[in-house]
């Protein structure tokens, strides 16, 4: 089990949180996504360490940026 925390910029509401959660959840091996809206922290739990590029691509697909 592996967990990593990223900071996502541009999220302003629960819809933003849902979009990021949905996209990041689709990455192979992801078991949990926890988004803290006030801080922009996104903690991703997965079976194995994820590539930062995969997380960045998923966040961008949702319409946001990694800080």
Image (cartoon, grey):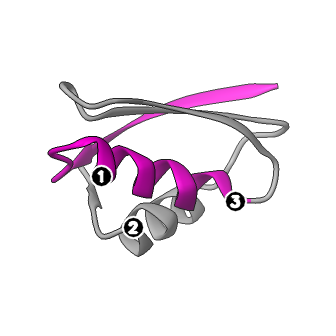
Q: Is residue 29 left or right of residue 37?
A: right
Q: Position of residue 36 (x, y in %)?
A: 33, 26
Q: Is residue 10 left or right of residue 42?
A: left
Image point (68%, 49%), residue name = 50
Pointer 3 local density, CA inside 10 Å: few below 14, some 14–19, many at least 20:
some
Locate residue 28: give its quadrant: bottom right
Circle nearer the N terminus (1, 2): 1
Contact flag, marks 3 and 1 (Cβ < 8 Å): no
Magenta residues, start to end: 1-27
Q: CA distance from mark 1 to mark 2?
A: 8 Å
Instruction: Report which residue position mark 3 lands on.
Output: 27
Kindly report which numbered mark, 3 or 2, lies closer to the viewer in this rendering.
2
Contact flag, marks 3 and 2 (Cβ < 8 Å): no
Q: CA distance from mark 3 to mark 1?
A: 18 Å
Instruction: Report which residue position mark 2 lands on.
Output: 62
Instruction: Report which residue position mark 1 lands on.
Output: 16
Kindly report which numbered mark, 1 or 2, lies closer to the viewer in this rendering.
1
Which dot marks residue 8?
Answer: none
């Amino acid at each position: 089990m592996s967990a990593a925390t990223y900071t996502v910029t541009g999220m302003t509401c629960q819809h933003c949180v849902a979009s990021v959660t949905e996209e990041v959840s689709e990455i192979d091996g992801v078991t949990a996504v926890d988004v803290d809206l006030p801080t922009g922290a996104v903690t991703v739990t997965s079976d194995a360490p994820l590539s930062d590029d995969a997380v960045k691509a998923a966040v961008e697909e949702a319409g946001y940026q990694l800080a």
